[in-house]
Amino acid sequence: MTIASANQTVLRRLTGAEPILIDCGPARTVMGLTGRTVLHAGPPLGWEKACETMKAAILCAIRYEGWAADDAEALDLLVKGAVEIAPCHAAGAAGPMTGMVTPSMPVFLVEERRSGGRAFATVNEGLGKVLRFGANDPSVIERLRWIEGEAGPLLGAAIRASGGIDLRALMAQALRMGDEMHQRNIAASSLLARLLMPHLSRAGKDQDALVRVAEFMAGNDQFFLNLAMAAAKAAADPCLEIAGSTMVATMARNGTDFGIRVAGLGERWFTAPVNTPEGLYFPGFTAADANPDMGDSAIVETVGLGAFAMAASPAVVRFVGAGGLRDAVRVTEEMAEITLGEHPHFRIPTLDERGTPVGIDIRKVVETGITPLINTGIAGRAPGTGQIGAGVVRAPLACFEQALAAAAAGRVAT
Amino acid sequence: MIGDLFARELRVINCGLEGFAQELTLLGVTVIHVEWSPPAGGDPRKAALLAALEDEEA
């Protein structure tokens, strides 16, 4: 198969994916996450190389599971190898920011109808002091336990009763309503709530519990983000089986390294040090407080959303400090320079219904020197701070150069 | 030949450095600027890798 035909095959597979939300349940049962395992965002990461924010989240996740009473005990378990850390992507999941997933956490199950592949993501905790941004105080664990005991089971019952929710259709609609599905998920979260509410109200026997879940969903504009990520992963993972393709199938960051995987090069990661996002900060914080880039959420840019769909989301441009509508259009047009085509389902009204640029080609990135732009939340670099702002960040060119060299070496070998 | 060129109105396509296009525009010359830079910033090693991965003719 030629590179061109491999890329067309893989692009059709990526954009033709049909991700359906079918369940929500404990990671232990839904994704088979057993033992004392903590999943993290990004490419594989040794404990010693982890940034302080990631370390704080991992230790807090161990306390949440009840494996340790305090951080010192949790650290001891890690050092002894009694707790394992592994990338979300290796277990079929995608986790925002620190990306913490442990066996007791409820996860959404998204099934890609064409391939039968499955992807998972936790329930978004909300804003402020939350585990995904490295916050680690008792309020973080209390919220996680409420999600585990009350929100997760109710959401699972409602989703099962719905018979499955077509996420591609929902995301295409949300894009037309001003979301780019990374830093703006207001429309998508609202559409999901509209679909789930009848089933939630029938599934819940406890009126007070229903009110708490409804308030939780209504109070979190980013509720849908994790689902967008699971949908994107469900679409992208089957692309890793297409030999010869130079299309990027994964982009992810762990606060230390940025990693990509390429369709034609399988599960192999190509990594380089992450950049630090630039953007706007909440009152009291500055760029000096920002943690380097982290999170699996760049999977949404990988499928043509996020910064790639910036022109569809004028509201997010201001939020991430990237200018106005003209700047948004410029970003989307720039990303079209490094992609293989336009998404047939994700269309942008402000660009006369053109599809979002999709299918990052490592050759185009190296040839032009244009690296993917990613919309992102910004975590504080001091452990326990939580979110301090939102902005944009570039993928490092070195990942794409390494992948290009590997692809060329493979070409010569065959 | 070159005499013929300058004997009539100049219409220029400028590739690469935009400064040339701007200077000609200031002089009243009709210019179309084409953004262009050498592949991979002119790095011969990367250019060779790109050449090895060019789309084949059908």
Image (cartoon, helix red, strand yellow):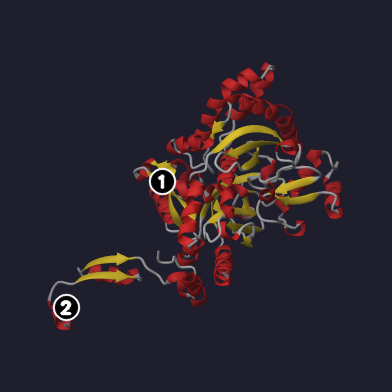
Q: Please state, as top left, top right, bottom left or bottom right, where the C terminus of chain A lies in the image.
A: bottom right
Please report the residue visible at 62 percent of the width from the left and 49 percent of the height from the top: A296
**Compared with residue A163, is residue A167 higher up or lower down, i.e. above or below?**
below
In x, y percent, where is residue A53? 70, 50
Given the image, on which type of amino acid does mark 2 rest? Leu
Which residue lies under the disc numbered 1?
A355
Residue A203, image quadrant: top right
Q: Nearer the viewer, residue A275 or B1?
A: B1
> What count of labels does the image hold?
2
Nearer-the-camera pick, A378 or A394: A394
Separation of marks 1 and 2 at Cα, in angstroms: 44 Å
Question: Residue A262's spot in the image, x, y percent?
Answer: 57, 58
Q: Position of residue A383 (x, y in %)?
A: 72, 49
Q: Is residue A225 above or below residue A330?
A: above
**Observer-nearest residue: A334 or A14?**
A14
The answer to whether residue A120 of the structure is visible from this angle is yes
Q: Residues within 10 Å of mark 2 (few under 14, many from 20)?
A: few
Q: Which residue is mark 2?
A: B5
**Position of A203 relative to A411 (above/below):** above
Q: From what the image shows, is residue A168 above or below residue A195? A: below
